[in-house]
């Protein structure tokens, strides 16, 4: 496969992932937060089995299987449930923006634990990302501390899960870069996420799922966006232009907010877009700070694998 074709396939992953927030919310509204997520990851696992296949676990580093499984499952639970537990469509979009702190957290973790070299731009980049999230959570008033605290207090579980998810994904990326040795366990990880959610569903107090045509459409689209998104990204980073893919991936928060606003019929104020743009700008600065000091293309590939 030539590089241009692989890069285009990788770019489809950006589009697919940008649609995930609205689709997850649509599934949860019809099938419930936990039941909907369990169905979604089950169907996505089937798509991955058909497109990527099941990995040969005997060739995988044991530490990667252990820590990768634990961190990946934890992250996906935080992501899906934070959106599913949101009170409104707009709150689901705001929650997803908190989760998009992970690029900045990932690069900070790479600097702290993987000896990733960086220049001074990482500091303003991280600060910009935090300010952007505060701006988003401030509501219509923008950067407003009282408004931000009020939004978080309205649903601390969703916002807390989203923030925890950002931290966990940064940890997963750090572990992957050090332990995976080029292996990709995403199919196994998705199956484990689905099994965990089914356990939570059957042993928890949840309303029964009610299937309808809109519910099935949302379910299939969300599962396809998740499963095929990971498959397309894997092709892109293995055979395409990693620099292009990593750079475009930092605009996912804006793309995601735009698509989610349309899917969920949740108009967003100007202040939201200012905050989302700051998050993107901060993440890009962090990326540039490390990119300028990378010693080799191999290091670039290791970091971009998680972006």
Image (cartoon, rainbow, N blue to C red):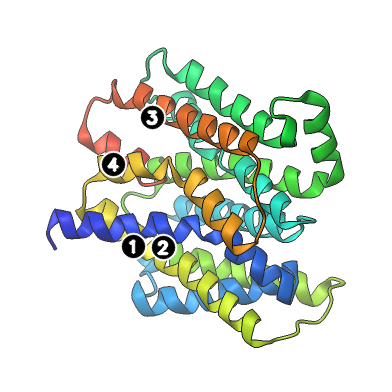
**Disc 4 and disc 2: Cα gap in Å?**
18 Å
Residue denoted by label 4 = 301
- Considering only vertical position in the picture, is 277 above or below 93? above
Residue contact at pointers 3 and 4, CB within 8 angstroms: no
Residue contact at pointers 1 and 4, CB within 8 angstroms: no
**Disc 2 and disc 3: Cα gap in Å?**
22 Å
Residue 202 vs residue 43, the one in the foreground: 43
Residue at 62% over, 64% down: 24
Residue denoted by label 3 = 287
Determine whether the residue tagged by mark 2 lies in a helix, strand or loop: helix
**Disc 3 and disc 1: Cα gap in Å?**
22 Å
Residue denoted by label 1 = 232
Image quarter in which the N terminus is found? bottom left
Q: Looking at the image, tell me whether mark 4 or mark 2 is earlier in sequence order.
A: 2
**Disc 1 and disc 4: Cα gap in Å?**
16 Å
Q: Quick one: label 4, few (<14), some, or many (20+) residues within 10 Å? A: some
Quarter-of-image position of residue 15: bottom left
Image quarter in which the C terminus is found? top left
**Disc 3 and disc 4: Cα gap in Å?**
13 Å
Residue denoted by label 2 = 229
Residue 18 vs residue 228, the one in the foreground: 18
Quarter-of-image position of residue 250: top left
Residue contact at pointers 1 and 2, CB within 8 angstroms: yes
Determine whether the residue tagged by mark 3 lies in a helix, strand or loop: helix
Q: Looking at the image, tell me whether mark 2 or mark 3 is earlier in sequence order.
A: 2
- Image position of 24 (left or right of 245): right
């Amino acid at each position: 496969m030539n590089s241009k074709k692989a890069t285009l396939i990788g770019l489809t992953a950006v589009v697919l992932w940008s649609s995930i927030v609205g689709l997850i919310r649509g599934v949860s509204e019809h099938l419930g937060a936990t039941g909907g997520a369990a169905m979604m990851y089950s169907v996505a696992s089937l798509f991955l089995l058909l497109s990527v296949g099941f990995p040969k676990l005997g060739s995988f580093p044991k530490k990667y299987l252990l820590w990768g499984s634990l961190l990946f499952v934890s992250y996906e639970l935080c992501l899906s449930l934070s959106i599913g537990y949101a009170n409104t469509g707009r709150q689901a979009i705001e929650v997803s923006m908190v989760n998009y702190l992970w690029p900045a957290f990932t690069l900070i973790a790479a600097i702290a634990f993987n000896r990733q070299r960086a220049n001074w731009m990482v500091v303003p980049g991280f600060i910009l990302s935090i300010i952007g999230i505060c701006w988003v959570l401030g509501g219509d008033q923008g950067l407003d501390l009282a408004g931000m605290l009020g939004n978080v207090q309205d649903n601390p579980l969703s916002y807390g899960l989203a923030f925890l998810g950002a931290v966990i994904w940064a940890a997963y990326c750090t572990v992957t870069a050090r332990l995976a040795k080029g292996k990709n366990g995403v199919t196994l990880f998705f199956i484990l996420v689905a099994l965990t959610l089914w356990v939570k569903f059957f042993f928890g107090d949840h309303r029964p799922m009610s299937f309808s045509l809109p519910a099935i459409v949302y379910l299939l689209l969300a599962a396809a966006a998740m499963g095929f998104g990971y498959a397309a990204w894997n092709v892109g980073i293995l055979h395409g232009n990693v620099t292009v893919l990593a750079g475009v991936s930092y605009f996912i928060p804006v793309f995601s907010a735009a698509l989610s606003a349309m899917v969920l019929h949740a108009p967003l104020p100007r202040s939201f877009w200012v905050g989302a743009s700051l998050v993107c700008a901060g993440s890009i600065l962090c990326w540039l700070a490390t990119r300028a000091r990378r010693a080799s293309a191999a290091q670039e590939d290791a970091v971009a694998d998680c972006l």
